[in-house]
Image (cartoon, coloured by chain):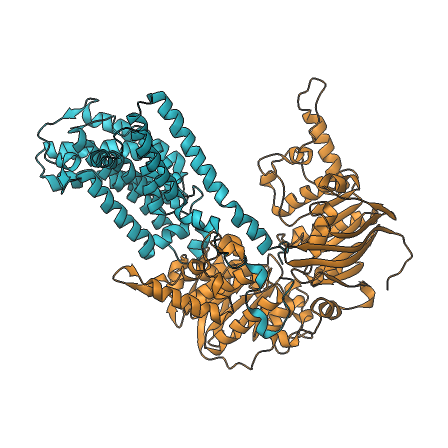
Chain colours: A orange, B cyan
Amino acid sequence: MTRSDRQPLLRLEGISKRFGATQALRGVDFELRAGEVHALMGENGAGKSTLMKILAGNVHRDAGRILIDSEEVEIASPADAVRHGIAVIHQELNTVPAMTVAENLALGREPRTRYGALDRRAMVEAARHKLARIGARIDPRRELGGLSVGMQQLVEIARAVGENARILVLDEPTAALSRGEAQQLYRIIGEMRAAGVALVYISHRMEEVWQLADRVTVFRDGGYVGTRDKGEIDSSDVVRMMVGRTLDDLYAHPVRRPGPVVLDVAGLTGRTGVGPVDLRVRSGEVVCLAGLIGAGRTEVARMIFGADPAATGTVTVDGRPVRPGSPARAIAAGLAMVPESRKEQALFPEHSVEDNISVSSLGDHVTAGVLRRGRIRAAVRAQMRRLRLRQSAEHLPARALSGGNQQKAVLARWLARDARVLILDEPTRGVDIGAKKEIYDVVNELAADGRAVLVVSSDLPEAIGISDRILVMRAGRIVGELASVSATEEAVMAHATGTASQAIGGVTR
Amino acid sequence: MTHQTLTPAEGKLSSADHPPAPRSFDLAYWWERVGILVVLVALVALMAVIAPNFATVDNLLNIARSISINAILAAGITFVILTAGIDLSVGSILAVSGVAAVLAALAGAPTPVAVLAGVLAGGVAGLLNGILTAYLSLAAFIVTLGTMTFLRGLAYTMTDGQPIVSNTLNFRDIGNGYVTGVPVPVVVMAVVYLVAWFVLERTRYGRHVYAVGGNAEAARLAGINVRRVTMSVYAVAGACAGLAGVIFAARVVSAQPTAGTGYELDAIAAAVLGGTSLMGGRGRILGTLIGSIILGVLTTGLILMNVPFFTQLLIKGVVIILAVAIDSLKNRPLRRRTRIADPAPAEAG
């Protein structure tokens, strides 16, 4: 299966873990060699993060063995993990923005002078050393909060790597990075690999994995599917391993016959260098905004919806201009947006599912200023049935739902409003495949019902699969337009990265 | 999450998504709804047994009258706390409003106009808090700390630092009169709570107040004018404080620049005691009423038992902390269930 020309540095054998009713890991194996980048892939809930938490000492396994240098070790706490040279960078940053870089790097182990005072000079020196080890050029005396997210992440890596990490786990490290920052991270990963560090790289972004990884291991539903050398396979093999089937029928939708233009965006520019952007979405059409992280897709979506102010440009719905800059006005004009970040921007976590769904359509159920609670409940239930959310969930706080069901609740909020235009920003991020399919079904229904749907997606197969047209953004502008029936992931990527030519397909704008 | 496979029929909420069906008796569920009422009933029962003359109609009406001012303040402040805000200025607003109402009456305004002047003064002061908080994005704690001091100064300035006593005050019945045997302040309090309950539970605006406190950004993206809602709750708190100020002035038949000093903390205590979360988005107006009553019953009962004033403070402090501790404990079972409910570690994509 794999070449055995090198002894594995780390071996995980038969690791199992159960949380309540869910078997998160079922006897999985994983092996890591010094000086390799090993991508760990799988759908959400496949068990990747659980395995890494076990490795980091944050979660204790139910069964299985951990071997480092062929010797069985026990990792019962994060301190054990550090002692064995294991460092894990989680998705969310774990640093103190108000402190300097050096202070963050020394957190909890601040050097002291003979008299017990803080030894600032030693602290800065140690910080320089740590930063140099990962090749990051950052002044340790700067305040951390003043750095870009990417830089902060490098500090986090420098801290985790410390002086002696041999195993570094990166969990979706580029999710919040700009392209330039991501490139810098890739370079540092390359240097660390050359220095003999073993890296586990968790990412959903196929292009990234293809660029970085030496080997790929795939999990599915808490089980081990397989490990392959990069040279043996292509991305569709990995998808097949991840999903256990081909994706064709996941995205299957009837042929759509788009009608007149519903959403018309012209000359839209943001205050952060996005645009000018022109785009149209027709009745019954699904258009996808594709591109790399930082290309400006979310910014465009948010400006159309009025969530962020636009500098110039017009948005019209059914020929009527929408006064910009206010989600409330956009909603009144028939727009709706499912934002990128569910927890921060869409959910009321402590409020009931019913309240979460009804919040935007209360105005439809008012008689003489009084809410008609029976009608609200009936409307909410209708949407819950449509999205196959169980009725008994209506009184639960939204936080008690899984990511997929939370997303369905947010979607139900807009279905209840009968919006003309739906903007879905990464609608299936963090959503399991069952809920994904249901979200796609809703998108299809909406289109069949004559709505205009604009989807922002970083998931290329999804972007191509569910849409009629793909608009590719790069550096704040729409640089290419492709018909989804003939689009390929390569063609989209070529536009997104700026290497497109007519030969690849699509129109370069 | 992991347990879902791709068969179209299987999209329904999976069993791991939520706690098992409520058992025959779910303590956390019931505590959330009636727990604080149980505390009140127990307290009243205890007082009836150990405090002499507690359980008499006269005494109970007296208690009701004595809590009415704090209860009205607390009703307004509940709106603010529900949006995750805070208002420290209601005690000072109470003073300014009382002064305004008395001055208006002395200037010859008929009763309704004098009362309105007091309520309006409170509303305007609250609106000032609201504008500074919502539109200049200043921290509510600091804004209302500032207006607390400023308005206290204003109350002193308006009265030259001296109480203005007017034995012929035309709206004195609002503090001292009775409607079919019930003190007027108690009637006013009941009306305030009925209106507040109705607004919060049965109007769109009320649900928006909860939404803003539950997640302000989500509320904005759901189409709610978050700034307007935020501004308005301070105006509501100010108007309530204005009404309380009128009652206070009527009760003491004078304009007192020192009126209401420290009342804001009792009002906040009542709201929190009643289960309103300082984090916003959670709480019930009737809980606040019960919280006010508990504080009032406790105070009166302790007085009837001749407990020294210093000791009363000790006991009240302990009760407030205990109540909040219970409130936090009652959430535990739910939290535990949630963990079981959402076991697969979050893997954002």
Dividing the image into 4 quarters, which one contains the N terminus of chain A?
bottom right
Q: Going 29% across and 43% down the picture, which residue do you hit?
A: B235
Dividing the image into 4 quarters, which one contains the C terminus of chain A?
bottom right
Can you see residue A240?
yes
User: In the current view of this chain or complex, which residue is farthest to the front?
Assistant: B49
Can you see residue B264?
no
Residue A393 image position (x, y, % from top left)? 49, 61
Total of numbered circles in the picture?
0
Q: Quadrant of residue A480?
A: bottom right
Q: Closest to the observer: B75 or A237?
A: B75
User: In the current view of this chain or complex, which residue is farthest to the right?
Assistant: A5
Left/right of residue A125 with respect to residue B121 in the rendered view: right
Residue A361 image position (x, y, % from top left)? 38, 63
Q: Going 43% across and 37% down the picture, which residue do you hit?
A: B323
User: In the current view of this chain or complex, which residue is farthest to the top?
Assistant: A115
Q: Closest to the observer: A180 or A21?
A: A21
Residue A408 image position (x, y, % from top left)? 51, 64
Left/right of residue A411 with respect to residue B66 in the rendered view: right
Residue A332 image position (x, y, % from top left)? 37, 64
